[in-house]
Amino acid sequence: MRFPLPLPVFFTTGVAVSAIAISACTTVPDTGRRQLNILPASQEISMGLTEFQKYKQEKRISNDPQMNARLQRVAAQLTRVIPLPDAQWEFVVFEDATPNAFALPGGKVGVHTGLFEITENDAGLAAVVGHEIAHVVARHGGERVSQTTMTGVAGSLLQAGLKGASGITSGQSSAILGAYGAASSLGVILPFSRKQELEADELGALYMARAGYDPHEAVAMWERFAAYKGRAGSGSKPEFLSTHPVDSTRIAKLNEFMPRAMSEYRG
Ligand SMILES: [Zn+2]
């Protein structure tokens, strides 16, 4: 759900942003990585809640009993162990043949019906959902927007526009939501960085292990995704794969992480 980035020329106000950044470092739980986050978590959460409400009104919700039961089962396991204290958890299956899933700040998770044939089983679904929620726990959307706001033309775009009551610009808001996979209006291309993807893979594997799923199933699931991509051909690249490139490096890195994940496996 990302759209081309328009490139209007605005003038930056970089000095003001730099001053804010000094007191805007946060730490990612479990990896301990320090990151830049210039926007308060509360603003991200209220955006996530609003966006999910909109998404539910605009998209068809699936009544498929098996898919819904599987998602709720996996959700019950994962939410016991995922460190997202302010979450108002909600897991919804949407009618959409595109294999995709997303998680928004505030604990709102959407899974497309088209994803279930690739995830295959509970552990496979836990791998994707755990990965998506890891992006939220690690506040990767806010971090991406913060990094971009500090530099370059996209940053100028993010700073432009009227600030709403929450003090956040419309550009920043849609960029954050876009990063989490749910941009609706303006739409700025701001995919997660490679580093963030690897971090989400590792956190997702940890959550799986703590929730009682063998984290090796995450590796198997990404391999199924790679096979699906091969079958679908280069002409029809599904959204999830366009933002989650599956390659041998990624799978190898996840494999390297297995000993740590297995040390927390409660199977
Ligand atoms: Zn990801």
Image (cartoon, rainbow, N blue to C red):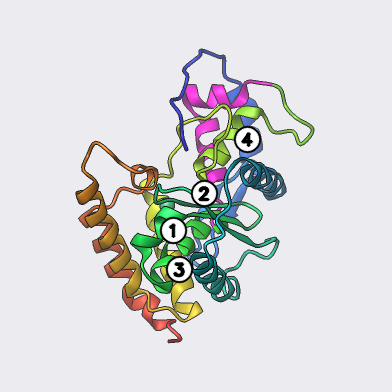
What is the distance, in whole Å, between disc 2 and disc 3 at their CAs?
A: 19 Å
- On the rendered structure, is 23 left or right of 133? right
Q: Which residue is mark 2?
A: 140
What is the distance, in whole Å, between disc 3 and disc 1 at their CAs?
A: 13 Å
Q: Quadrant of the C terminus?
A: bottom left
**Residue in the image at 39% along x and 52% along y:** 197
**Circle 3 SS class:** helix
Q: Nearer the viewer, mark 4 or mark 3?
A: 3
Query: Hey, what amino acid is under mark 2?
Result: His
What is the distance, in whole Å, between disc 4 and disc 1 at their CAs?
A: 22 Å
Whether ligand 1 has any atom under 8 Å from the Cβ at mark 2 is answered as yes
Whether ligand 1 has any atom under 8 Å from the Cβ at mark 3 is answered as no
Task: Mark 1 and mark 2 in contact? Answer it, CB < 8 Å.
Answer: yes
Along the line of sight, which residue is nearer the eye, 211 or 124?
124
The region drawn magenta spans 138-161
What is the distance, in whole Å, between disc 4 and disc 3 at their CAs?
A: 28 Å
